Image (tube, rainbow, N blue to C red):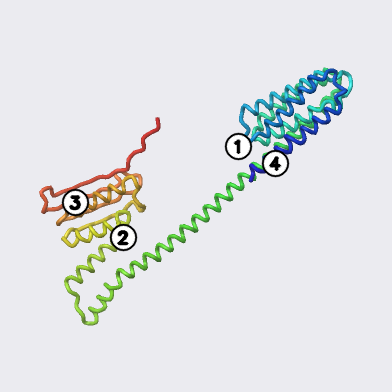
């Protein structure tokens, strides 16, 4: 929106107004002492109009084009002043002053404010010197340059207001996006919590009903007690070892515990594993769980930023090599060369 608005400002100041001043110069073409410099300045003016309106895909004008505008307006002023008669006020024959001010204002709206002010400074010095050399009074000479300077001050103020508006819009958009993201996270957390509670109820209801049946006089078999112990361990894994739990890991862990292996899954990371190591961690954990016949297995996801990222320690008295220790670290990024 801001770029579209400045584009319209550029079109207004860089086309209609400079062309209007060229027309006024043509209407006073009987004043200059020579016409080819006079008309050459008009052609340069029209070329600068095309250059300023050229769309490069960005609002900021290419640097080479901006320098061309600065050089072009200075050359216009020198050409016109070189053919104005001495000792009289040129009136609208000095059309280049109005055209130059509009071209530099348009350059300001093309995000080249410093170069526009440089061009204005060079123009003011050149035009003031030429006017005094042609015999104009100091008041008349100043009048010819003060109006362009005033236009540049106004353009600078407008550009600053537009810039502040753009910054405010960016801040408000960022705040709105942050609020929307926070609301989405809260909503997602609520849905996840609701789904987790539903799954927890489905998983624990049969166990609770079995325990309630025991209170009513129905005893629990050894198989029932084992299932309850395994269920309790799985629920503990989901709370204490969330980053290390997948459906495949749950199945392998359950099978290992049935064989008598004590399994501890601990998540100190409090967030999911990075994709760069997740597949390796789960593959190695599945292999060790599948091979363990007794003893203890402890897998730990360490806090973010620590190395290694995951450790797996298994001790199996029934195996020839009774201890297994694995460290898995995140790969370090390779510096760009």
Q: Which residue is mark 1?
A: 58
Q: From the viewer's perspective, is the residue at label 4 or at label 3 nearer?
A: 4
Name the residue tied to disc 3.
314
Q: Nearer the viewer, residue 24 or 145?
A: 24
Residue 32 shows in this picture = yes
Front residue of 66/210: it is 66
At 26% from the left and 78% from the top, the residue drawn is 212
Location of the C terminus by quadrant is top left
Picture quadrant of residue 211 = bottom left
Question: Measured from the top left, where is residue 145 in percent x and y?
Answer: 79, 28
The picture places residue 253, in percent across and down from the top left corner, at: 23, 58
Indicate which disc, 2 or 3, sits on the residue closer to the N terminus.
2
Lateral position of residue 70 relative to residue 234, left or right: right
Rendered view: 122 above or below 261: above
Specify whether 26 is left or right of 214.
Answer: right
Q: Which residue is mark 4?
A: 8
Name the residue: 73% across, 29% down.
46
Task: Work out how far the residue at label 4 is from the one at label 1, CA to CA, in angstroms.
Answer: 14 Å
For marks 4 and 2 on the same chain, the one whose residue lies earlier in the sequence: 4
Q: On screen, 101 above or below 308? A: above
Q: Of the residues under marks 1 and 3, which one precedes in the sequence?
A: 1
Residue under label 2: 238
């Amino acid at each position: 929106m801001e770029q579209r608005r400045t584009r319209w400002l550029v079109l207004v100041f860089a086309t209609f107004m400079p062309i209007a001043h060229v027309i006024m110069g043509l209407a006073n073409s009987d004043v200059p002492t020579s016409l080819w410099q006079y008309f050459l300045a008009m052609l340069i003016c029209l070329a600068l109009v095309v250059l300023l309106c050229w769309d490069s895909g960005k609002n900021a004008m290419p640097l080479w084009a901006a320098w061309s505008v600065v050089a072009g307006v200075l050359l216009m002023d020198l050409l016109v002043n070189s053919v104005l008669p001495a000792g009289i006020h040129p009136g609208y024959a000095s059309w280049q002053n109005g055209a130059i001010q509009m071209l530099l204002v348009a350059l300001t709206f093309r995000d080249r404010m410093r170069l526009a002010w440089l061009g204005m400074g060079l123009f003011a010095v050149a035009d003031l010197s030429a006017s005094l050399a042609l015999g104009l009074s100091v008041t008349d000479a100043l009048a010819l340059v003060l109006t362009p300077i005033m236009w540049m001050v106004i353009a600078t103020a407008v550009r600053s207001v537009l810039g502040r508006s753009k910054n405010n819009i960016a801040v408000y958009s960022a705040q709105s996006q942050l609020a929307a993201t926070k609301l989405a996270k809260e909503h997602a957390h609520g849905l996840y919590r609701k789904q987790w509670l539903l799954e927890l109820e489905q998983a624990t209801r049969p166990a609770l009903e079995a325990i309630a049946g025991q209170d009513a006089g129905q005893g629990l078999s050894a198989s029932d007690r084992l299932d309850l112990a395994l269920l309790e361990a799985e629920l503990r894994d989901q709370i204490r070892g969330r980053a290390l739990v997948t459906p495949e890991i749950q199945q392998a862990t359950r099978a290992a515990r049935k064989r008598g292996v004590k399994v501890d899954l601990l998540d100190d990371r409090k967030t999911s594993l990075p994709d760069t190591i997740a597949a390796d961690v789960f593959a190695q954990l599945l292999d060790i769980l599948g091979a363990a016949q007794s003893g203890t297995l402890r897998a730990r996801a360490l806090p973010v930023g620590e190395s290694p990222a995951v450790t797996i320690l298994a001790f199996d008295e029934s195996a020839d090599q009774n201890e297994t220790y694995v460290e898995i670290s995140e790969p370090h990024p390779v510096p760009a060369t």
